[in-house]
Image (cartoon, helix red, strand yellow):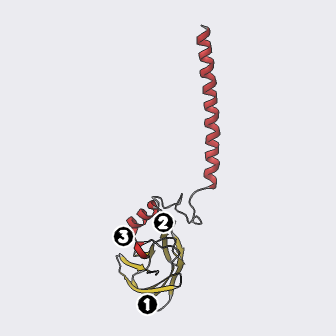
């Protein structure tokens, strides 16, 4: 009889402790979720509204773009999303080394600048209207320019390579 009462007391104390910890953990999680998460000002890949490891989509004028690919998840997400974007750019160096911080400037056929930004990684996906563009990419002090044509169905790709010897 005494053993049963003791066991019930232990079970009751354990249950009370578990409930207390559960409530405290839930309150902490709720507080944390109010502070973190993807917003339009959050340009990291963690917790953004895009999901699936894709970095936060950014906007400049009427051009949307996303760049990154430093981590494996982000790199895979950008490669898988390429076909859904009108223009896909890739930046590499010697030994296919991925490059970041490449200044990207895109001008249209009338030499109007439509995008001027820096890539956050080796991949950049850009939503442009169909037309003829020139992409100017500068890494450190070396600039390259390439003409691209974005068709109505998209799918234009351009790769930039810097031999840094």
Q: Going from the N terminus, do you reach mark 2 or mark 1 first? A: 2
Q: Quadrant of the N terminus?
A: top right
Q: CA distance from mark 2 to mark 3?
A: 20 Å
- Horizontal and vertical percent position of residue 2: 62, 9
Question: Mark 2–mark 1 contact, CB under 8 Å?
Answer: no
Q: CA distance from mark 1 to mark 3?
A: 23 Å
- Horizontal and vertical percent position of residue 101: 53, 75
Q: Secondary structure at mark 2?
A: loop
Q: How many marks?
A: 3
Question: Which mark, by number, is residue 83?
Answer: 3
- Horizontal and vertical percent position of residue 42: 58, 64
Quadrant of residue 80 within the rendered picture: bottom left
Q: Secondary structure at mark 1?
A: loop
Residue visible at 40% across and 73% down in the picture: 95
Residue tagged 2: 70
Q: Secondary structure at mark 3?
A: helix
Quadrant of residue 83 within the rendered picture: bottom left
Residue visible at 50% across and 85% down in the picture: 142
Q: CA distance from mark 2 to mark 1?
A: 32 Å
- Horizontal and vertical percent position of residue 5: 62, 13
Please give left or right for residue 149 compared with residue 102 in the image.
Answer: left
Question: Which mark, by number, is residue 33?
Answer: none
Q: Going from the N terminus, do you reach mark 2 or mark 3 first? A: 2
Residue visible at 56% across and 60% down in the picture: 38
Residue lying farthest to the top in this orientation? 1
Question: Which mark, by number, is residue 109?
Answer: 1
Query: Considering only vertical position in the picture, is 29 above or below 153?
Result: above
Mark 2 or 3, closer to the camera: 2
Residue lying farthest to the front in this orientation? 165
Residue visible at 35% across and 75% down in the picture: 155
Pick the front one: 104 or 30? 104
Please give left or right for residue 52 compared with residue 46 in the image.
Answer: left
């Amino acid at each position: 009889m005494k053993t049963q009462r003791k066991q019930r007391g232990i079970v009751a104390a354990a249950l009370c402790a578990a409930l207390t910890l559960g409530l405290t953990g839930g309150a902490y999680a709720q507080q944390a979720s109010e502070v973190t998460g993807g917003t339009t000002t959050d340009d990291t890949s963690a917790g953004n509204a895009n999901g699936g490891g894709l970095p936060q989509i950014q906007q400049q004028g009427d051009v949307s773009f996303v760049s990154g690919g430093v981590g494996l998840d982000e790199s895979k997400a950008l490669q898988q999303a390429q076909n859904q974007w009108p223009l896909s750019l890739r930046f590499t160096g010697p030994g296919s080394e991925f490059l970041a911080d490449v200044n990207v400037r895109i001008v249209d056929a009338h030499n109007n600048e439509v995008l001027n930004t820096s890539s956050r990684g080796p991949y950049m996906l850009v939503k442009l209207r169909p037309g003829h563009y020139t992409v100017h990419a500068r890494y450190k002090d070396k600039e390259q320019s390439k003409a691209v044509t974005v068709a109505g169905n998209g799918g234009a790709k351009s790769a930039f390579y810097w031999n840094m010897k």
